[in-house]
Image: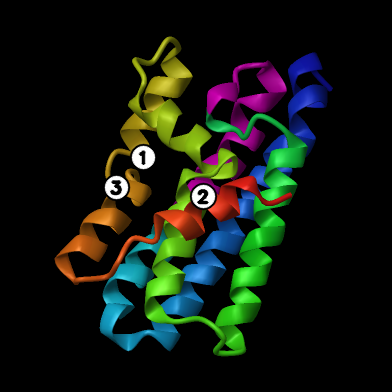
């Protein structure tokens, strides 16, 4: 096993778990909030694509120390934190404990979290390797989730709750 592979494998696997869990959340939201079904479904598919990109990178680039580390979360701790929060939100949605406004605000928080922001940053930066450039090209239309959430909220009169988002940012 290559040195990069040893160091990155746990974070990469958690990153894949996070993307799949986000897809599950967005599928759940598409079912529970029919007025936003197409929007949530689109995000669910994009998160599945993110997971597929990471899985492909794990198989193709990681064994050769060529995996673009900047697409991964910075730490297992940050990734575990957001995974736990996403699981809580899925539970709230299944138990019908959240409103449409709340789920959108949770999604804004999640997409801006340390667990997800890394991916967006990597997709926006000037690629310094051919592998990152390939990831960016393949992911061209599957980005800007936070910006798209905020735009959708504005277009549909859904209030952005900055206090809730800030509170989530400071939770342990």
In this view, which residue lies farthest toward the left? 155
Q: Within the image, what quadrant is residue 130 found in?
A: top left
Q: Earlier in the sequence, mark 1 or mark 3?
A: 1
Quadrant in which the N terminus is drawn: top right
The Cα atoms of the two marked residues, 2 and 3, are separated by: 17 Å
Q: Is 107 on the left-hand or right-hand side of 140?
A: right
Residue on which disc 1 sits: 139
Q: Earlier in the sequence, mark 2 or mark 3?
A: 3
Closer to the eye: label 1 or 3: 3
Closer to the eye: label 2 or 1: 2
- Helix, strand or loop under label 1: loop
* Residue 142, position as x, y percentages in the image: 34, 47
In this view, which residue lies farthest toward the top? 128
* Residue 27, position as x, y percentages in the image: 47, 75
- Helix, strand or loop under label 2: helix
Q: Are marks 1 and 3 in contact (CB under 8 Å)?
A: no
Provide the residue span drawn in magenta.
49-70
Residue 48 seen from this side: no
The Cα atoms of the two marked residues, 1 and 3, are separated by: 16 Å
Residue 24 seen from this side: yes
| Helix, strand or loop for the magenta stretch, by majority | helix
Q: Are marks 2 and 1 in contact (CB under 8 Å)?
A: no
* Residue 99, position as x, y percentages in the image: 44, 82
Residue on which disc 3 sits: 147
Q: Residue, x 67% and y 16% (percent of image)? A: 65
Dot label at residue 166: 2
Judge the density around disc 3: few (<14), some (14-19), many (≥20) Cα neighbours within 10 Å: few
Q: Is residue 168 above or below residue 96?
A: above
């Amino acid at each position: 096993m290559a040195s990069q592979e040893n160091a990155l494998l746990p974070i990469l696997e958690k990153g894949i778990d996070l993307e799949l869990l986000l897809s599950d959340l967005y599928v759940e939201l598409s079912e529970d909030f029919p007025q936003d079904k197409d929007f949530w479904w689109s995000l669910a598919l994009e998160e599945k694509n993110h997971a597929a990109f990471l899985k492909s990178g794990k198989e193709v680039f990681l064994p050769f120390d060529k995996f673009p580390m900047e697409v991964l979360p910075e730490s297992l701790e940050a990734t575990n934190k957001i995974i736990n929060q996403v699981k809580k939100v899925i539970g709230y949605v299944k138990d019908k404990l959240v409103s449409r406004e709340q789920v959108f605000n949770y999604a804004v928080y999640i997409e801006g979290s340390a667990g997800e922001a890394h991916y967006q940053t990597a997709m926006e930066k000037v690629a310094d390797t051919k592998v990152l450039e390939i990831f960016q090209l393949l992911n061209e239309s599957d980005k800007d989730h936070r910006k798209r959430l905020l735009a959708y909220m504005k277009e549909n009169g859904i209030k952005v709750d900055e206090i809730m988002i800030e509170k989530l940012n400071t939770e342990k």
